[in-house]
Image (spheres, rainbow, N blue to C red):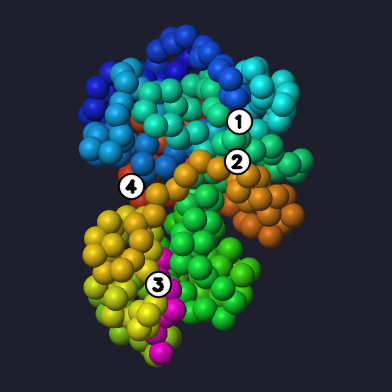
Amino acid sequence: MRAMTYDRYGDDDELRMTDRPIPKVGPGEVRIRVTRASVNPVDWKVMSGGLDALMDATFPVIPGWDVAGVVDAVGPDTPEFTEGDRVAAYARKQIVSAGTFAEYVSVMADDVAAVPDGVSDDIAAAVPLTGLTALRVLETLAVTKGDALLVHAASGGVGYLASQLAVAAGAKVVGTASPANHDKLSAIGVTPVAYGEGLRERLRDVAPDGFDAVADLVGGVLDISLDVLREGGRLASIADPTVEEHGGRWVWVRPDGERLAQLLDEVAAGRLEVEIDRSFALEDITKAFAASRSGSATGKIVITVAD
C-alpha cells in the first residue's frame, strides 16, 4: 500500500511516499480502507521528536491519527462492524508507527464509530481528535448550565467545537480569538475577546465576577487564566502541564468510539458545525504540515487518500 513515512525524527524533509505492507487485522480490530485523514499539530510535533519522552516509536513511522473510510476487513470476534461499513476513528496507538496517512490502517473496534448518512468523509475525518478533545475538556471541567466558561483559542480546531458544545450545555461562553474570527464566534453564541496585550483587562470587562471554568487550548496563558478564575473555579489545559501545579488538569484525549459516534450524530443532526479549511493529496503531506504550522488555517486540514 502507499503510505507517507519517515525513518527518523526530523522536519518535513524526512517524509517519503513508500510502499508498505497492508496491515494485518487482529482480534477485536477492523481494517479501514482510508478515504480521508486529517492533520493535527500533534502529527508534526511527533515527527519532530517532541513527544519521544512520552511515546515509543517504531520506524518507519506512518504519521496521522484521524481517519475516515470503509471497513475492509474485520478480525476475529468483532461483531460490531462488517465489510463495507463507513467508519471514522481517532486511531492513536500506544506505539507511534502505523498511522492513518496510508491507504489502510487497522484500529481497535472500540475506537471506531459508524459514520451517519449525510456526514461526508471529509467531515468525518475532521472530527475525531478535535471533537473528542473538546468533549474531554468540557467533561473534565464539569461544565454545566449557567457556568461562565472562558475558552482560550475558541476559533481553533478544538476551541470551535468545545465552544459549540458548551453553549449547547447552557454555559455562558467567552472565547479569545483574533478579530477576524469574532463574527464566527458570535454566530454560535460565544462572546469574542481579542487576545494579545490587554487581554486580562478585556476579560474582566466582559466577566467582572470572573469565570467558573477556563479551558486553555493554546498554552502561555496560565497567569491570565488564574487571575480571571473565580475562587474554587476549574482549570484545564491541553497545552500546559504546569496547570496541575495550580490545581488544574492537563488533559490528553483518549480514543473512544462511543463518544465519537455521539459527536458524529450531533454533526448529522446539524447541531455541531465542523469547518474544513482545505484538502491536500496524500503525496502533499509536507504542504499540509506547512499549512498547519502557519496557523493560518480557519478549519481542519483534510488529506484525500481515495474516493
Q: Residue 56 location in percent, x, y?
A: 29, 29
Q: Residue at x 42, y 80 (%)?
A: 211
Secondary element at image label 1:
helix
Going by the image, does 144 lie left or right of 262? left
Q: How many marks?
A: 4
Q: Residue 48 location in percent, x, y?
A: 25, 34
Which of label 4 and label 1 is nearer to you? 1
Q: Residue at x 45, y 48 (%)?
A: 253
Q: Are marks 2 and 3 in contact (CB under 8 Å)?
A: no
Q: Are marks 2 and 1 in contact (CB under 8 Å)?
A: yes
Magenta stretch bounds = 209-215
Residue type marked 3: Arg
User: Given the current orientation, which residue lies at the most extreme front position?
Assistant: 77
**Mark 1 sits on what residue?**
109
Please rate how many residues cluster around mark 1, counting C-alpha atoms within 10 Å: few if below 14, some from 14 to 19, many from 20. Answer: many
Question: CA separation, marks 1 and 3?
Answer: 33 Å
Q: Residue 86: which quarter of the image?
A: top right
Question: CA separation, marks 4 and 1?
Answer: 34 Å
**Mark 3 sits on what residue?**
234
The answer to which of marks 4 and 2 sits earlier in the sequence is: 2
Residue type marked 2: Gly
Q: Residue 179 location in percent, x, y?
A: 42, 70
Residue type marked 4: Ser
